[in-house]
């Protein structure tokens, strides 16, 4: 196998060297560590020994030529091996001659939206208040020193915009027509405890987690066939969630940041896959948790999903069965949904929403075909997961759901 | 403790056999960076001996094989640096006797605090080749010497480590362990203020420290004769109240005896000594250096004739302890050992960022 | 419990350490017979003898280098450098060896030593005797830098520093040595190196200081309280590693911060703290972070000292800047 030897930096920060004398000719046999060439750098004339034993297939330059550090100095291989011309281009084995390890590659965002104008003067905390109130800070009149927008200015603007029912300053617009005329009564009731909890959790997730949702579709032909076959064989109904949970596990193993919790500055990667299943109940959305999903096969998962669904609807589940999921699957397809933008449950980093599989035209092997197409939507915490990773995760999920043999075998 | 008075030269003087073997008096000036009769030694460059050798033939063969192994490492390291596989390397060819002889004089558990040019010394004191090579590839894990081996990773700054050997020896004495510490440094380091502080502290507290100066003639390009107006480096010991001896640094037996005497003296509680091993750096200061800019080839040739290995080979041959077959065998063995160490070091995966950060404290986190 | 000043608390801590751990040794210039120039080691030579407490030649690099060797070989040396301004000859040892041996040897060798040094001005001393160059130590990775401002912390932090498996630079505020007294336990206790101490709780403003400047900061806080401002006072006390979370928690609450230090402004630790606050708390800030520091001059001699040292009035002025508007 022919191997390139590239000119190393032999003198602490040198960038090039001149070939002074070749000590071996093309076609010569060389031993490992045998001096092969004399080069002159800015610091000294030195002999360079060969890192390999073999036959010199090609010199990387003629005597008098200046080579840059990193350029091919010599190609060494076996007698009668392929023309050296090819080798200088590619097909060469890994080289020696590099010292530094590559630093970790950090994915940078592909798009940055710059928001909030610096035209007005306001403290960051005031800008934040305005943003949270849905106000464009440039439209607010500042009453502070140098026209600075104060907290009071934002509070005043917020009241004007969002609370028409509050008493307006004297001499301004009267209360809303409808209310003034008493045409339609509104009803006000406190939400149920569960609804309030859902609301608080949703707000917390939405306020703190920068969401990104990625969408795609899978051809669910094989998935539905497998589901039918398993149902026939075991004479039970297999909830789609059981297969989806099983199918998402390989992706969670490959991308542990999707099975994680962001705790302050620390990212906690969980040791087990405790998968939350979104359950639609009369009172509202509940999430029941399949503990350690890896330890269960599809049939066992089916039993567990069914048990949890019933328990959630009947409000018989214990707290431990309703909290602590590390990833969530929501089968919005059960109520006819397609793509959506699911909210990442607080304390986790991602959620997968599965829509209803419907017959649609697809391109299969270059021809148009009809197949059950299942919409997938994955929302994730953008603080933890970059777009590229999100996409790769999605693709691994799709690969598994399109060919269930992949995850059923695992 | 520390009730003894400093003694001048006891122990070391005893090993000087006859009038020409002077230590401090009548020593040649630095301008003669040479092996005069005033320099202590036992084996001459032609393999003849000046006195009865206090070691056996087998021990002599062992020292020779060790020097061959050290030179194999040195040669391999230079080649690897030229191939881009090692970071900058400081060759020690010509100084094998000074390093192997000194290390051979130490006992298990004794401390060694040396420099970037002391690979042979460190190895003979227990530092594995594979870790020395790993370190030179640019990996801090090369500094993780095995438990029980008390050799500090090489000091890169010049001179700062000499005082460490004083502290190490001091602590061992306070803990009554019987261990001593040896620090190795070059002629250049004796210009640092650190040399003064270390020598003075060691003498003041009579710490069991052996100061080994490998005077190889140059501080990079600056000749020893221009670095100091003192007649010798060994002579500086007198000012601190400790014995100093000038020894032929290319004579492995001479160095061994001198260091052994100094070590025993230290172990007896009689304090530190300074040994100036007069030697020569055959190669460049480092692989980034070009010695033709500051010295003649003639000079290096003269020192090649005083090669520390060749004189022992001649001696062994005369004593019936050498033949080509044995030479080939120890060279092959040395090559196998070094190649295996290289293979191991190059197979170690690069450190992760977490590993880099974890080395900052016991709790593993970077500070700040 | 006994009421002691900061100096005596330090003496007591070293007494306790020498008594409870055979590995502890003290070394430094004039620390034996003379008991140290500030008498911090007074009586310890007599009590523990010349094999535990060493007077040394005048050689700071030698002291630190020897202590470093001792630490590697299993002792727990506590080295005293007479003044921070005299620590620079030892800086090579500190930065190139003490702070690096764990990294250089991948944890095989460690340097559990403490380097004590009195620091700061306000006592009309000669040139070089009033330095507060803590930032040149906090800038070095792997060095812990600690500075107490109360007798209780002085004892707890020094014992913690001696116990610590890594090197600790222990700064002692000269002008507080005998200026603060407190009842402290005589038992063996340690104060964790790292966390800040919230000395006074408040809602409107966080004053952040350490060491010598705690005196002026406390006074400023009292006067601000009298003016109706609710002030939180933080004694940083561990300068490296910095308790960024602790500082952020306070500033998140108050929305205002003033950092006070005696060292010059440029490159001072106050800049690091202010940067950390804006990284973590920007959206809670209701005013820019203020710094009250020494001038960008060398520390002046006696007759100009009052011009140099940050005053209570300067702290109140800076606080007011954050409070108005």
Image (cartoon, rainbow, N blue to C red):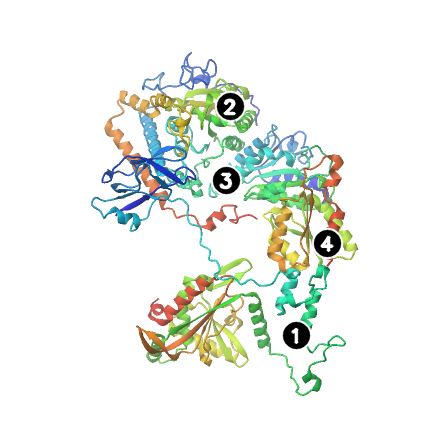
Distance Cα–Cα, label 4 vs label 1: 33 Å
In the depicted view, which residue is nearer to us: A64 or B229? A64
- Numbered disc in front, either 4 or 3: 4
**Labels 4 and 2 share a subunit:** no
Q: What is the number of the mark on residue A162?
A: 1
Q: What is the number of the mark on residue B270?
A: 2
Query: Which residue lies most toward the bottom here?
Result: A183
Chain of the residue displaying label 4: C
Query: Which residue lies most toward the front here?
Result: A64
Residue A129 visible here: yes
Secondary structure of the residue carrying tag 1 is: helix
Label 4 close to label 2 by CB (< 8 Å):
no
Q: Residues within 10 Å of mark 4 (few under 14, many from 20)?
A: some
Residue assigned mark 3: C101
Chain of the residue displaying label 2: B
**Labels 2 and 3 share a subunit:** no
Query: Residue A134 location in percent, x, y?
Result: 62, 70
- Numbered disc in front, either 1 or 3: 1
Secondary structure of the residue carrying tag 4 is: helix
- Numbered disc in front, either 2 or 3: 3
Distance Cα–Cα, label 1 vs label 2: 90 Å
Residue assigned mark 4: C321
- Using residue A65 as the reference point, say whether residue A151 is left or right of it: right
């Amino acid at each position: 196998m022919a191997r390139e030897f590239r000119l190393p930096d032999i003198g602490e920060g040198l960038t090039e060297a001149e070939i002074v004398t070749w000590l071996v000719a093309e076609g010569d046999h060389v031993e490992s560590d045998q001096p092969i060439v004399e080069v002159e750098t800015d610091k000294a004339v030195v002999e360079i020994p060969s890192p390999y034993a073999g036959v010199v297939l090609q010199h990387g330059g003629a005597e008098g030529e200046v080579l840059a550090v990193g350029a091919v100095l010599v190609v060494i291989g076996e007698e009668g091996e392929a023309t050296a011309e090819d080798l200088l281009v590619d097909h060469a084995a890994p080289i020696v001659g590099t010292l530094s390890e590559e630093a970790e590659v950090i994915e940078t965002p592909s798009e940055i939206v710059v928001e909030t104008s610096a035209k007005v003067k306001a403290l960051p905390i005031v800008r934040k208040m305005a943003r949270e109130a849905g106000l464009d800070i440039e439209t607010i009149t500042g009453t502070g020193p140098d026209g600075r927008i104060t907290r009071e200015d934002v509070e005043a603007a917020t009241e004007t915009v969002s609370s028409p029912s509050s008493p307006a300053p004297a001499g301004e617009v009267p209360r809303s027509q409808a209310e003034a005329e008493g045409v339609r009564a509104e009803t006000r009731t406190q939400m149920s405890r569960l609804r309030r909890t859902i609301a608080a959790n949703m707000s917390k997730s939405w306020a703190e987690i920068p969401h990104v949702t990625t969408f795609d579709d899978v051809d669910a032909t094989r998935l539905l066939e497998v589901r039918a076959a398993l149902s026939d064989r075991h004479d039970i109904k297999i909830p789609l969630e059981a297969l989806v949970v099983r199918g998402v596990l390989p992706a969670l193993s490959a991308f542990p940041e999707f099975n994680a919790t962001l705790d302050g500055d620390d990212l906690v990667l969980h040791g087990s896959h405790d998968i939350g299943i979104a359950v639609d109940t009369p009172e509202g959305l509940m999430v029941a948790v399949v503990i350690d999903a890896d330890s269960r096969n599809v049939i066992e998962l089916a039993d567990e999903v069914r048990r949890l669904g019933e328990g959630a609807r009947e409000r018989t589940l214990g707290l431990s069965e309703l909290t602590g999921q590390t990833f969530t699957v929501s089968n919005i397809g059960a109520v006819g949904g397609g793509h959506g933008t699911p909210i990442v449950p607080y304390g986790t980093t991602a959620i997968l929403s599965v829509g209803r599989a419907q017959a649609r035209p697809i391109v299969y092997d270059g021809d148009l075909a009809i197949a059950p197409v299942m919409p997938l939507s994955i929302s994730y915490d953008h603080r933890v997961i970059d777009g590229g990773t999100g996409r790769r995760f999605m693709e691994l999920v799709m690969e598994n759901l399109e060919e269930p043999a992949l995850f059923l075998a695992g | 403790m520390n009730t003894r008075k400093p003694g001048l030269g006891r122990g070391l003087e005893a090993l000087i056999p006859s009038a020409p073997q002077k230590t401090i008096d009548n020593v040649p000036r630095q301008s003669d960076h040479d092996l005069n009769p005033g320099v202590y030694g036992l084996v001459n460059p032609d393999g003849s001996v000046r006195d009865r050798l206090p070691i056996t033939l087998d021990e002599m063969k062992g020292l020779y094989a060790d020097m061959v192994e050290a030179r194999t490492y040195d040669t391999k390291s230079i080649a690897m640096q030229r191939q881009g596989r090692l970071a900058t390397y400081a060759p020690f060819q010509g100084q094998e006797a000074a390093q192997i002889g000194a290390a051979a004089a130490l006992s298990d558990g004794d401390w060694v605090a040396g420099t970037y040019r002391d690979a042979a010394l460190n190895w003979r004191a227990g530092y594995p080749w594979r870790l020395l090579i790993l370190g030179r590839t640019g990996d801090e894990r090369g500094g993780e010497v095995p438990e029980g081996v008390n050799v500090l990773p090489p000091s890169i700054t010049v001179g700062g480590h000499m005082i460490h050997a004083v502290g190490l020896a001091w602590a061992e004495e306070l803990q009554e362990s019987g261990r001593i510490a040896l620090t190795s440094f070059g002629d250049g380091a004796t210009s640092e203020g650190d040399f003064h502080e270390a020598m003075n502290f060691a003498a003041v507290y009579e710490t069991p420290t052996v100061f080994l100066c490998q005077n190889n003639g140059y501080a990079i390009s600056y000749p020893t004769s221009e670095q100091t107006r003192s007649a010798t480096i060994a002579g500086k010991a007198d000012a601190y109240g400790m014995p100093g001896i000038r020894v032929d640094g290319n004579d492995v037996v001479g160095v061994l005896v001198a260091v052994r005497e100094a070590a025993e003296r230290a172990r007896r509680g009689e304090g530190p000594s300074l040994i100036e091993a007069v030697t020569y750096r055959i190669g460049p200061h480092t692989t980034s250096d070009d010695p033709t800019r500051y010295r003649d080839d003639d000079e290096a040739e003269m020192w090649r004739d005083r090669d520390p290995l060749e004189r022992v080979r001649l001696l062994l041959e005369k004593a019936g302890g050498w033949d080509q077959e044995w030479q080939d065998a120890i060279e092959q063995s040395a090559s196998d050992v070094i190649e295996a160490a290289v293979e191991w070091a190059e197979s170690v995966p690069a450190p992760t960022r977490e590993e880099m950060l974890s080395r900052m404290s016991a709790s593993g986190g970077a500070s700040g | 419990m006994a009421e002691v000043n900061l100096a005596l608390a330090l003496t007591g801590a070293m007494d306790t350490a020498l008594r409870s751990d055979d590995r502890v040794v003290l070394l430094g210039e004039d620390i034996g017979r003379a008991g140290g120039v500030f008498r911090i080691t007074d009586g310890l030579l007599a009590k523990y003898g010349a094999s535990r407490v060493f007077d040394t030649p005048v050689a700071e690099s030698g002291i630190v280098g020897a202590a470093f060797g001792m630490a590697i070989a299993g002792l727990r040396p506590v080295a005293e450098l007479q003044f921070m301004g005299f620590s620079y000859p030892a800086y090579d040892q500190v930065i190139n060896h003490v702070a690096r041996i764990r990294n250089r040897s991948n944890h095989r060798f460690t340097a559990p030593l403490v380097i004590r040094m009195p620091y700061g001005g306000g006592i009309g001393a000669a040139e070089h005797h009033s330095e507060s160059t803590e930032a040149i130590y906090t800038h070095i990775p792997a060095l812990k830098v600690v500075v107490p401002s109360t007798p209780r912390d002085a004892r707890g932090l020094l014992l913690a520093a001696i116990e610590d498996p890594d090197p600790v630079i222990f700064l002692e505020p000269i002008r507080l040595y005998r200026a603060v007294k407190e009842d402290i336990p005589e038992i063996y206790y340690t104060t964790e190196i790292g966390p800040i101490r919230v000395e006074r709780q408040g809602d409107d403003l966080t004053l952040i200081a350490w060491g010598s400047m705690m005196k002026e900061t406390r006074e400023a806080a009292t006067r601000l309280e009298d003016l109706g401002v609710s002030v939180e006072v933080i004694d940083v006390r561990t300068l490296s590693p910095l308790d960024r979370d602790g500082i952020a928690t306070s500033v998140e609450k108050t929305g205002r911060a003033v950092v006070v230090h005696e060292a010059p402004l440029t490159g001072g630790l106050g800049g690091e703290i202010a940067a950390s606050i804006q990284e973590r708390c920007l959206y809670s800030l209701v005013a820019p972070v203020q710094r009250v520091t020494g001038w960008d001059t060398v520390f002046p001699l006696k007759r100009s000292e009052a011009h140099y040292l940050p005053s209570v009035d300067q702290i109140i002025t800076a606080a007011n800047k954050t409070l108005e508007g």
